[in-house]
Amino acid sequence: MDYGKTLNLLQTDFPMRGNLPQAEPKMQQEWDEKDIYAQVQKSRQGRPKFILHDGPPYANGGIHIGHALNKILKDMIVRFKTMQGYDAPYVPGWDTHGSPIEQAIANGGKVDRKKMSVPEFRDYCKDYALEWVERQKKQFKRLGIRGDWNNPYITLLPKYESQQIRVFGAMVNKGYIYKGLKPVYWSPSSESALAEAEIEYKDKTSASIYVAFQVQDGKGKLPEDASIVIWTTTPWTLPANLGISLHPDFDYALVEAAGKKYVLAQGLLESAAKEIGWTDVKVLSTMKGGRAGVCALQASVLRPDVACDGRRACYAGRRDRVRSYRSGPRGRRLHHRPEV
């Protein structure tokens, strides 16, 4: 008996198998021919806007699973907002500047940039980036991502660069741009600066150190034969030292120990003396940090003249050792973590 003939099944032309590798390209071709994205946007004209600012990928190679996850999740959000009635355009873009593109070309081994002039290498990078823009565009469209693929933003286009200059000019006019001092990480292998997010630190235990800064001109507030004591966990920053700051409201003691005079926080004198190894400490006088005013110090052989400022408020932690702080360029504290 043919049991198949005993079943009352619906008659349909719907295929039993999805055959998505064959069906999806035809479906996407139909979307392109009908310009579904433009029709959807036209139907939402005048409705409240929902703008998803999409951070662009680098145009330096094929997409990977991270690109797919990123774009598909964003596509779901944009489509959802469209279904809620919002005018939700999606403009894809590409970052075509910077080291990743140059590094991809160098790793490819097809050209030696050191034998090319700067304009020649830039033109090569431009052509390379635009080629990958088109390749990635096809890959993203193959994922079913809906957007204005015919009008993407590309960072190397003059209209985009000109807008960047306008924004930068506005920032200058508002005083947001200034020239200062900042350490910049450099990669010798890629010959490029590195972002702080690209740096991974190795755990390392470093010795802390007590340093005495000799008073040169105490302005009648501090004796010239005394030294101000600081404690630091970053002794390698000592060459950049530009000053010593005392908290104006903290009590400081002028003491005599080991045949010399020192200034340090009165409340921390006992613990500091124990760590330094002072056995016979004599308190000569006490004063508020603000009373010290501004006096001259001998910081080191690299910095012969720095200032001690007792008027500037530097907030000390509860576990601080001496409550005297070193200052660097632009008044920055010279340590990467609290001196505790």
Image (spheres, rainbow, N blue to C red):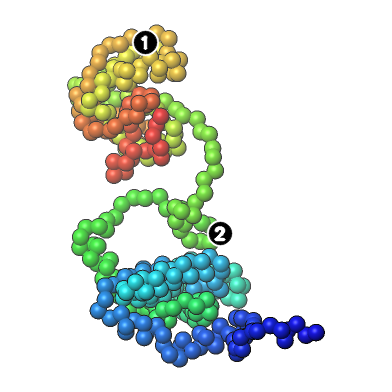
Q: Nearer the viewer, residue 168 or 92?
A: 92
Regarding mark 1 in the picture, which secondary structure is present there?
strand
Left or right relative to 221: residue 4: right
* Residue 89 image offset from top left, x and y in percent: 35, 76
Amino acid, disc 2: Ser
Where does the image place residue 24, in percent across and percent down from the top left? 56, 83
| Disc nearer the start of the sequence (1/2) | 2
Q: Where 144 falls versus 179 (above or below)?
A: below
The residue under label 2 is: 189
Quarter of the view holding residue 253: top left
Left or right for 41, reference 106: left
In the image, residue 172 sits, relative to residue 220, either above or below, namely below
What label sits on residue 281 in the rendered view? 1
Q: Secondary structure at mark 2?
A: loop
Q: In terms of depth relative to the viewer, which is nearer, 79 or 5?
A: 5
Label 2: how many residues lie within 10 Å, few (<14), some (14-19) or many (20+)? few
Image location of residue 200, percent across then percent down: 52, 49
Quadrant assignment for the N terminus: bottom right
